[in-house]
Structures are given as C-alpha cells and as structure tokens.
Image: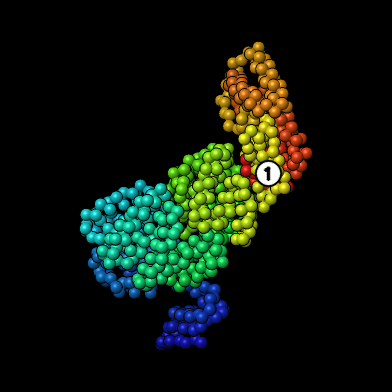
Amino acid sequence: MTRTATGAAGPRLVVLDGIGAPIDHPDQLAADGAAVLITATDATEPHFRLAPLTKTELGRLLTGRPSAVVQAVWLVTGGLPGPALDLAATVGDDDDAIVTLALNTLPRLEFLVPDVALIRLLESAAAQSRPAGVRARLLIRLARELLYDPSAARRRRELVAEAVRLARGAGDAGTLAEVLDGRLHALWDPAAAQDRLASASEIVELARQAGDPSAELRGLFWRFTALVELGDLEAAEAVLTTYARTAELAGDAQAAVVVLSRQAELALVRGRFDLAAALTAEVATAGRRAGLADTVRLTASLTGRLAMLRDEADQHIAPLQELARRLPGQFFEATAARVMAEAGRNDEALLELDRLLPAVLAGTGPRWLGAVADLALVAARSGDPASAQHLYDALTPYQGRLVVWGGANTIAGPVDEYLGRLAGRLGRSEQALAHLNQAVILEERLGALPWLATTLAIRDQPGDQERSRSIAGRLGLAAVAAGDEWRLLRDGTEWRLEAGTETVRLRDVRGLHYLRTLLMSPGQEIAALDLIAGGSGLRVPPGEPVLDAAGRRAYQRRLATLEEQLDAADRAGDVTRAQTLAQERTALVTELRTQSGTGVRSRRQSSEGERARVNATRALSTVLSRLETTAPLVAVHLRASLRTGSYFRYHPAPGGPRHWRV
C-alpha cells in the first residue's frame, strides 16, 4: 500500500507499508524532493538506510542549545535523528547535562570494541573541575572504556588509582561500588582472582547499602568469575543462581542472557552437549531481543567450543582471524593457532606461535591466560623447546586453577593439563605426570568429562587409555584415532614406541636420541654436528682457526676412538657406558668447533662435519633397520620422511601421524 501526503508543489511524504520485496528504482520515489518512509514485515535487502546527521545538521535541529550539549548528544546517538531528538528533550542546557550523558549512556558496542564517541565524551567531561564523587565516576568509566587498548595500561592504572582515592574519600557507597567494579574491569589482572573475589564481596555489600541493584549484579558476576577461575564450580553456580534471581527482580533482560550463556558453557564443561546447544539457541534469540551487543560473539564462542570438542573446528579459523583483525592486541590469533593445530595444520599453527609468543608473554588482560594456554597446546604438539619453556614459566603461577577467558564466557580446562603437556614436550616425564595427576583430580571433582577424557589419554598410565576411550565414546566424542598421534617416549632405560597398532620397546641407542630431536622439530634442518652434539642450538661465533694440523689430527683420532667405543657399547647394550662416551664426544665436538672457528651455519664440508654426517646417518639407519622387523609401518614412514646429509630433517611423508609426542 502506498500513501502520500501532498502539498502545493506535489508529494512531500511517501509512505510504503509492508514492503516484502525489493523495490525497482527506489530513487524515483524521492525525485521531487519528497521524504520516503518504508515499513517492512519481512527482512529485505537494505536499499534504504537512515543516514546520520552531521554535528552541524544536528545543531540546526537543536536551535539555541549550547554547542557542548549538541556535541554530547551527537556523540552519544551517532547523529541518528530520532534518538538524538529524543535524548535532547531529556537533558538540560547546563554542564550537568554533559556529565549525565557521559555517566549514563549504555554500552552500545561489543566487549573490547572501542566506543570512540563515548571515550571522547568522557575525556571532555573529565577535563573540567568536578566534585570528587562525580570525577571518580568519570575517571573510572574512562579507564574501563580504554581496556581495548593494550598500550593504555599505564594510563588505566593512573585513572583507576585517582578514581579509587576520590571515591573512598567521597563517602558514598554507590560511588565506591561503581568505582571498585570499574577497577576490576579496567585492570583485569589475570593473576588477581583472589582480589576479584574479595572486591566482589565489597561491591555487593556497598551496592546493597546504596540500594543499587545494577551494581549488586556486577559484584555478583565478579564473584562468579573469580570462583570459576579458582576451580570452584559448585560455589560459582550457586552465585550464578543468585545473580539470575537478582536480575529478575531488577528486570534486567541482558543479565538473563548472560546467565543463559554461562549455563551453556558449564554444560559444555560437563559434556552435556545437547543441553549446551539448546541453551546456545536461547542465547541467540534472547540476546537479540534484549539488544545485547555481545550476542553474536557469545553464540559464536559457544558453537566454536562445541565444534572443537567434536573435532569440527576447522571452519571457525577464518572468523577468529577476522576478530583478530578487528580487535588487535586481544590475542584471537592464539585461538586460531590452537584450532589450526587441532585440525592438523601444524605448520600454520607454528608460524602463529612464532609470531605471537613475544607479544603474548608481555601481555595481560581478560583474554591473556586463555591465549597462553592456546599457544601452550601448539608448542606442546610440535613447538621448539625454548617456546615450550617460556610458556611453561608463564603458566606455572596459575597451576591449580582453570583457564578462563574474560567473564567465564569460555572455560578451557585446568592449567595443570597444559603444564603437563609442556613438561612432556620438554622431556620431564615425572613433572608432566605430577601436573596431569592434579588435572585429573580437579576434572573428576568437577565432573568435567570431556577434559578428563583428554587428560587421561595424555597421561597414559595403566588403564587410562581404556577409560578415556570409554568416556569419549559415551559422550559421542571421537577418541584420539590411531595414527593421529604416534609416541616415542623414554621409559626408564628403554624407549617405548606407540604408533597405531604397532607398539614396541627399544633398547637405548644413539640413533633414538637423534630421531627424537628430529621428530621434535618437523620441517627444520639440523646440522649433523648439532645433531650428534645433542640437538640444534649450538651457536659458535665464527673466528680464525687456532688449531694447528697436529692438534686437529689428535682431536680426530680421539673422536674416531669414541665412535668405535660407542658402537661397541650399543652392541653390548651397555647404556651407562654409552651415555658416558656420548657426553665426552659432545664436549669434544663443541671444543673442536670452538677451537677451529667453524660457525654452526656454515655448509663447508669439514672432516668433522663429514664424520658427524656419517655417524648420525649410520645411527639412524640402525634404528630403522630394527624397526623394519618390529614396527614395519613406522619404518616405512620414517624412511620416506627422513632427509640426511650435512643437514638432517624430518619432513613428514603421507602415511604418518598428525603429530608426534616425544
């Protein structure tokens, strides 16, 4: 139906009701200068969009209003005519109007997305002299809005310190509750879970004194988050119930959506996947209805977590990379790297590890601990030992806790599980077992069955694999498939090789040490001299040779003798003797290279390098020959994958595992 309001010069307003399909030549409707109003009952392509007014245009509509008020209204509403006119009608023309707008404008954007207009309004209001309580509220809201910017950490701390000082001096319970809440948000120290718990109790008490249900809700939510971080899910769920009832009394529809999203996450933690999916659908519907800005990201986080548990996460890499582009400094790339590793895209994951590690180690904030855990998973699968050690050190202060993103919108398992993975990568089997034992205890207490299935498979103690497969099967999860992970692990004085249907115990010989070094660094070249000296990493500065010919020959004779003795020790199975001789040879090679001035990166064919190549090749060949009779599938894969010469490399050929655990 089309209705027109006409004037002497023709139509002034064209109203189109109930448009259900695109309109041909919509520009002709306004050809004579008429305004056009379109209503639609169904979603259509956005041929018509309401353009925001410029500040000058809004000023013409608000004739006679102070320019500062016009500026504030324009910033808060984005220049949209209807909201701008409605808001302008509710505020006065004095300076208090600007403060009112700065303090009471509701968040319009997603978490960690900068609201530039609001920040400008807050900075403008805070630049003027204000009463202590008002200034405290302005400063703390400004600090809170700056959380998106990692480079603003120092400024946030300064704003928070002044706001807390002013609020405590003002003597108003409501102001202090608001400032303490903003402090937790603006600083968001990953290590401060106990501080969050204590501050949450103070916020709740102050909010009740002030009769402020919104502040009470925020305090309850901080308490819930802290309890989840500390691994007390039973207490956290009790607080979440209180939060939900308080939100009902306050008529807070957005808080009700938050409750649904956290209930969905807790359902995922315990393996109640159907319930989690149903709650996620409710989050999507209720969030849109309540106007919650974070609705899309909340539902994406929940569906992504469920997809990862079901080994279907590959499709979520691109959205994570898009988030990383939109929100730099928030470490979404780390989660993308984890998903890449889970999907078998190890080379891409390792590149992200190399790119991100320095920034993550220097970072902080609501997503930091989760980012460290994500990179830890990548490093534990195939990262270099140095990266694994850095991440282990970063996670150690958090052992006994859960990995939590933000306000517990994502819970990614016990920190001890990641520490156990890293310790295993570093060859510290006893340390790894201790961490994994603690993770299992926590997971059993929480009833976190998906985590438990994973940790049992990693721990690999008697009965663990059977129990892991049983849990995974009953949950409908795919257990670690034979061939997804092969293992070459020290077991006392022997080695244990597990590769799908092939399991074998091997006597300790030099070739297994060389093989382990190569498997730890797939695709990386390792010089023969490095390999026999204990792995890559020797870096001797080049210099002029200081050995004469006689000295060099003496070194070479001793090396030849050591090689013969090592061969004899290997044949005799004398592990202690072989270790002693290997240590002497390593020291001798290092000293020879130092004295000869040969740089590690040089590809010159020295006699020492040639000897190292021959000996390493022979040692690896011995291992492969033994595997041909005990684990023929592994032998075929390794023969196709190992590259020898002056530089050695494990380049995985088809038919092998997605990753090695060594």
Q: Please tell me which residue is depicted at 41% across the width and 87% down the height of the picture.
A: 7
Q: Please tell me which residue is depicted at 63% across the width and 56% down the height of the picture.
A: 470
Q: Please tell me which residue is depicted at 59% across the width and 21% down the height of the picture.
A: 591
| Residue 286 visible | yes
* Vertical side of 93 occupied by 30: above or below: below
- Residue 59 occupies which quadrant of the picture? bottom left
Where does residue 233 sit, x and y in percent of width and height? 45, 58
Q: Is residue 205 left or right of residue 570?
A: left
Where does residue 423 sit, x and y in percent of width and height? 54, 41
Q: Is residue 183 left or right of residue 345?
A: left
| Residue marked by disc 1 | 498
In this rendered view, identify the residue nearer to me: 555 or 571: 571
| Residue 75 visible | no
* Vertical side of 77 occupied by 616: above or below: above
In this rendered view, identify the residue nearer to me: 78 or 407: 407
What is the crowding at mark 1: few (fewer than 14 residues within 10 Å), some, or many (at least 20)?
Answer: many
Residue farthest along the front direction in this orientation = 462
Where does residue 72 sit, x and y in percent of width and height? 32, 65
Q: Tell me the SS state at disc 1.
A: strand
The color scheme shown is rainbow
Residue farthest along the right direction in this orientation = 629
* Vertical side of 427 occupied by 472: above or below: below
Q: How many marks?
A: 1
Where does residue 135 sit, x and y in percent of width and height? 26, 57
Q: Is residue 16 left or right of residue 199?
A: right
In this rendered view, identify the residue nearer to me: 280 or 59: 280
Quarter holding the C terminus is: top right
